[in-house]
Amino acid sequence: MSQETSYNQIQRVEEINNYAESVAQIMRNTMRTMPIQVTSNVEKIKTVKNMFASSSSANILHSPTSLKVLQKRLNQNIAILNLDNTEQTDEVTKIKAAAIAMLEQENLRIENKELVEQVIEELLTANTIEQTTEKLSSAFAEIKREHAKVFTDTLSSAIMAASSTIGFDQVRLETVTPSLIRIVATNRKGINLISEIHTDASKKIDVLSELEGVTDGSCENIMDEFNAELEKRGIVAVRKERKSTGGIARLPYAKKLQKNRNTSKREFLNQQVIAKDNKGKVVQYVDGL
């Protein structure tokens, strides 16, 4: 008997990689050289009461699907500036300030710092509403792509660490396709813990895990330990499911490993039979002398 578990629509994971750059920090650095009109409006947004009540925790990464909230928060920031009647602010400056304040608020992570700095610079140098809107859209798209990559990398690292912690310390990762990452972890008994990260066109991320090769009834305890380790690493999903496979592999790669295991077993048994037959013939021949 074996078991499989699924985490559907991953929402978040705790950050365990330090290689990724913080977009918020990039924004703070960029503000030092921004036009005073933009920085003063960013500060206005920041001073609004409870502005940062919903800010993301610095050590939690939210899934790519949650990034649709960025547009909402951008609009909220613009609304804050529209309510301020102390001085006249042009629409281009409002859009820029609202975007900078929003990006400084969120815990967004990227790998290509130079590219993100470039798209932000293009946004800040735009002169018309049309140009600013276009550059903002490009900047958001690039940051979202970068964040999605960091998120799946962080999720992969969390799964690998969880697998290793419970004794599946022979771990390998394979990017099968742009939408499928496979992690295969093996313990000393030769049992395989297979985890697959699936990303669909809408950036929804699911994790499917399955044990292969369990013969001693320990599958339930192993999955208990594995799921506990995933939770320790802050992996949260909309829905979790777990069920027995009845010893029949479900994931395609698990089926492949099971087939190879059964083939090896048959070959070994055939070799045993042949060895016994040969031994019988030798004894009969010797006795006939």
Image: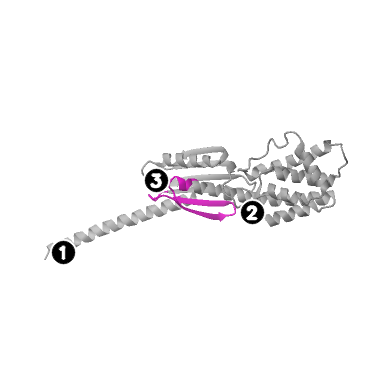
Q: Amino acid at mark 1?
A: Tyr
Q: Is there a contact, CB below 8 Å, between mark 2 and mark 3?
A: no
* Image quadrant in which the C terminus is located: bottom left
The crowd level at tag 1 (other Cα within 10 Å; few <14, some 14-19, many 20+) is: few
Query: Marks 1 and 3, Cα distance to the nearest angstrom?
Result: 43 Å
Task: Give the labeled residue for mark 2.
Answer: 111
- Numbered range of the magenta stretch: 162-191
Q: Where is residue 130? Give x, y as percent.
A: 83, 50
| Near-viewer residue (205 or 112) | 112
Identified at 57% across, 55% down, the residue is 177
Pointer 2 or 1: first along the chain = 2
Q: Where is residue 204? Give x, y as percent.
A: 61, 44
Q: Is residue 285 above or below residue 86?
A: below
Task: Give the labeled residue for mark 1.
Answer: 285
Circle number at residue 55: none
Please say whether residue 244 is visible from this viewpoint.
no
Q: Residue furthest bottom?
A: 289
Query: How many marks on residues?
Result: 3
Task: Give the labeled residue for mark 3.
Answer: 214
- Asked if residue 127 is among those painted magenta in the image, a careful observer would answer no
Q: Amino acid at mark 3?
A: Val
Q: Amino acid at mark 2?
A: Glu
Q: Secondary structure at mark 2?
A: loop
Q: Residue furthest top?
A: 49
Q: Nearer the viewer, mark 1 or mark 3?
A: 3
